[in-house]
């Protein structure tokens, strides 16, 4: 509250108004009374204001006290809350420490549990592996025993006089075992040989108290119980200066061999042959045939066949056919192979041998069809092809001139059988022949140089001359070719059984070579002796063409085609003859026919390229040379002609590469070498 001022008096003139009022009050009594009243009111007002201020102050003080108390209370509450919070944090911290300790304890327990589980797992695994190993050993032992078809040679009984000089029963039995093993090693066979071992080696003592038994004893008893072993026993009896050695075995009769004291090694060999005969008649028949004893082999088969198992009979028929073929009784051999196939349509080796005999009989088309039938029946080249040695396809591959395949089949067979192979003759010289036909002269010569029996084995010697004759023909060295083929003919005349080891009569090649060295009489005689085979017929065509009788030549080529229309050789020779007469268009047709029947034969492709070159189709010629090189990269003439086609296309740098290859191969004829030198000099 304040003084009641005139409504029209400004607020800042209040003091002045009061003074004026006081001055005028002394002059005017009424004014004075009024002023006194005013002053009293003002005094009362001031008093009221003071009281108000005092009360306000008191209230303010009280409010401040209340606020202070409130603040103290709030502070106390806050402090309490802080204390509670601190206490809560302590409790939480203690709880976390407890949880952490509990977690650590749990982790420790988990680690211990995991360690325990791992130890238990390892222990169980070890026990399982041990149990599995024991079970595997037991199962393997049972299976091995059940499948065992081995020949077991036991210790022989010998007289005391033998023991006194060191020839106890073990020594004599070991000598017998060695001879039996040598017979197996000396036998080339596609049938797996029986395992031959002694009955006293590798005895390991079983460490069980009071048990005196060896693992060898356990195995022998198990194999004897479940297997099909042939147990061999022998005894030597001395009567003065004479001895009698008796050998007996499971499933065959005992046989006694007699002689003087010094004849024991011979008696052991005879006895080993007898056991080999009884235990493995098929393989022993092969052994006899390989050593020129075909009559004995046939007699063995005839005696063994009636009692042979169904599994062994096809093998025996196959050996019978082989013996007949060696004796040049091929027609009868065909019947034996067919009987083997009838007994077992999947007896693949009989198909291969049937093809071989059909070739010897001049039935090359029939041989080809036999091979095709086997190839289809065996599903060759498919995921489900029959399991057999690829060598069984070699006759078919040779008929269609798939020479790289035959080469690989021979190499694989030699590699799989200790470098010797399973054919009845050395395989290396035959491989050299395949390489020579592929014009790979350096490889062919190298194989001949490293072939065992090069100076003693009659087949190896004959095949070596034949290969050198092929290489001489390739290089147009006709006099050398004639000399080589004459050497082959002389060996085959002396040893006629070797004729069957050649897929084509070497006399056909002799006839061509004799004509090329201007000896037509010898040529006609040799061709006539070769018989009705494709090579002789096509070479007759070549001879007629050389003599200028083109009409007769074409008749001979047609006769060769008619003889075996599925084979490529006749078409190839006919195409070359047409090229010589400048008929490149028809020559290409013949090369196409040859390539269709022998797609992996390099010759038709190379000569097709030459015909295209002569026609001026250089780009197409290069393609044919490239295709041919897939099957014979080492043919010098091919590289030379390839370079010439590239030169004609203006690709001189590439041509230079092929000329260099041709020069490095060094298997060119004299005319080809002169041409090559001319090309190289032009490049320089």
Image (cartoon, grey):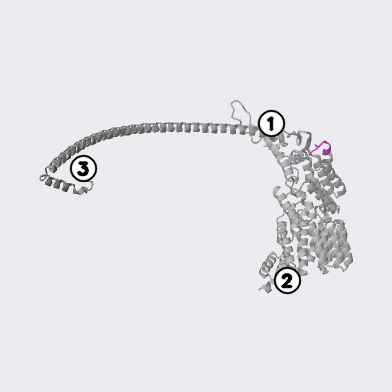
State how far apart marks 1 and 3 are (Cα).
143 Å
Magenta range: 304-311
Tell me which residue sits at (81%, 67%) in the image. Answer: 584
Mark 2 and mark 3 in contact? Answer it, CB < 8 Å. Answer: no
Q: Is residue 23 left or right of residue 452?
A: left
Marker disc for residue 4: 3
* Local SS, label 1: helix
Q: Is residue 510 left or right of residue 668?
A: right
| Residue 105 seen | yes
Q: Position of residue 681 (x, y in %)?
A: 68, 73
Q: Dividing the image into 4 quarters, which one contains the C terminus?
A: bottom right
Q: Residue furthest left?
A: 26
Query: Quarter-wise, where is residue 485 in the image?
Result: bottom right
Label 1 crowd bin: few (<14), some (14–19), many (20+), radius 10 Å? some
Give the residue at mark 2.
Answer: 675
- Mark 3 residue crowding within 10 angstroms, few (<14) / some (14–19) / many (20+): few
Look at the image and say whether residue 448 sits in the magenta stretch. Answer: no
Q: Where does residue 454 sit, x and y in percent of width and height? A: 74, 55
Task: Determine which of the numbered discs, if any, sits on residue 234 in the image.
Answer: none
| Cα–Cα gap, marks 2 and 3 | 150 Å
In front: 584, or 193? Answer: 584
SS for callout 2:
helix
| Location of mark 1 (residue) | 222
Residue 292 in sight here: no
Q: Assess disc 2: are there few (<14), some (14-19) or many (≥20) residues with their C-alpha within 10 Å of its C-alpha.
A: few
* Side of 407 where 128 appears, left or right: left
Indicate whether 360 appears above or below 283.
below
Depth check, mark 2 against mark 3: the one in front is 3
Q: Earlier in the sequence, mark 2 or mark 1?
A: 1
Determine whether the residue tagged by mark 3 lies in a helix, strand or loop: loop
| Total residue callouts | 3
Mark earlier in primary sequence (1, 3): 3
């Amino acid at each position: 509250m304040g003084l009641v001022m005139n409504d029209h008096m400004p607020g800042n003139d209040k003091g002045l108004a009061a003074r004026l009022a006081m001055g005028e009050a002394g002059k005017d009594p009424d004014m004075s009374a009024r002023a006194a009243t005013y002053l009293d009111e003002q005094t009362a007002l001031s008093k009221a204001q003071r009281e108000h201020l005092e009360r306000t102050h008191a209230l303010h003080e009280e409010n401040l006290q209340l606020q202070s108390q409130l603040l103290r209370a709030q502070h106390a509450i806050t402090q309490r809350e802080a204390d509670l919070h601190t206490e809560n944090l302590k409790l939480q911290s203690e709880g976390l420490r407890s949880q952490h300790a509990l977690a650590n304890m749990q982790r420790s327990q988990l680690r211990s549990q995991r360690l325990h589980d791992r130890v238990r797992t390892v222990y169980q695994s070890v026990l399982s592996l041990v149990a599995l190993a024991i079970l595997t050993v037991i199962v393997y032992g049972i299976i091995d025993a059940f499948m065992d078809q081995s020949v077991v040679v036991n210790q022989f009984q010998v007289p005391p006089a033998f023991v006194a000089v060191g020839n106890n029963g073990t020594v004599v039995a070991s000598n017998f075992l060695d001879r039996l093993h040598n017979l197996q090693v000396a036998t080339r066979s596609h049938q797996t040989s029986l395992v031959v071992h002694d009955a006293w080696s590798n005895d390991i003592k079983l460490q069980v108290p009071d048990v005196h038994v060896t693992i060898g004893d356990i195995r022998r008893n198990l194999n004897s119980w479940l297997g099909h072993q042939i147990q061999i026993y022998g005894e030597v009896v001395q009567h003065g200066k004479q001895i009698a050695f008796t050998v007996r075995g499971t499933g065959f009769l005992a046989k006694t061999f007699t002689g003087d004291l010094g004849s024991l090694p011979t008696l052991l060999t005879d006895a080993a042959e007898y056991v080999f005969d009884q235990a493995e008649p098929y393989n022993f028949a092969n052994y006899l045939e390989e050593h020129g004893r075909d009559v004995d082999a046939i007699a063995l088969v005839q005696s063994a066949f009636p009692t042979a198992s169904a599994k062994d009979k096809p093998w025996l028929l196959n050996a019978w056919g082989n013996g007949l073929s060696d004796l040049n009784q091929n027609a009868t051999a065909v019947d034996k192979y067919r009987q083997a196939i009838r007994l077992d349509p999947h007896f693949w080796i009989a198909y291969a041998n049937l093809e071989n005999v059909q070739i010897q009989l001049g039935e090359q088309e029939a041989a080809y069809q036999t091979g095709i039938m086997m190839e289809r029946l065996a599903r060759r080249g498919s995921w489900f092809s029959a399991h057999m040695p690829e060598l069984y396809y070699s006759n078919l591959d040779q008929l269609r001139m798939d020479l790289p395949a035959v080469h690989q089949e021979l190499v694989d067979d030699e590699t799989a059988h200790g470098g010797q192979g399973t054919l009845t003759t050395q395989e290396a010289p035959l491989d050299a022949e395949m390489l020579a036909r592929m014009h790979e002269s350096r490889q062919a010569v190298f194989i001949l140089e490293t072939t065992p029996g090069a100076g003693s084995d009659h087949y190896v010697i004959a095949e070596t001359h034949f290969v050198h004759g092929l290489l001489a023909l390739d290089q147009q060295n006709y006099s050398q070719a004639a000399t080589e083929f004459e050497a082959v003919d002389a060996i085959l005349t002396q040893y006629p059984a070797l004729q069957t080891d050649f897929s084509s009569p070497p006399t056909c090649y002799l006839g061509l070579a004799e004509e090329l060295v201007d000896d037509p009489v010898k040529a006609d005689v040799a061709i006539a002796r070769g018989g009705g085979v494709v090579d002789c017929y096509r070479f007759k065509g070549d001879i007629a063409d050389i003599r200028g009788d083109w009409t007769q030549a074409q008749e001979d080529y047609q006769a060769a085609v008619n003889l075996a229309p599925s084979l490529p050789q006749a078409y190839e020779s006919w195409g070359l003859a047409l090229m010589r007469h400048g008929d490149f268009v028809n020559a290409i047709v013949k090369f196409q026919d040859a390539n269709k029947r022998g797609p992996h034969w390099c010759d038709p492709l190379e000569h097709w390229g030459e015909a295209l070159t002569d026609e001026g189709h250089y780009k197409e010629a290069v393609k044919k040379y490239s295709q041919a090189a897939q099957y014979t990269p080492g043919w010098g003439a091919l590289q030379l002609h390839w370079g010439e086609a590239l030169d004609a296309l203006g690709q001189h740098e590439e041509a230079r590469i092929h000329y260099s290859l041709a020069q490095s191969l060094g298997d060119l004829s004299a005319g080809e070498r002169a041409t090559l030198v001319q090309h190289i000099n032009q490049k320089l």
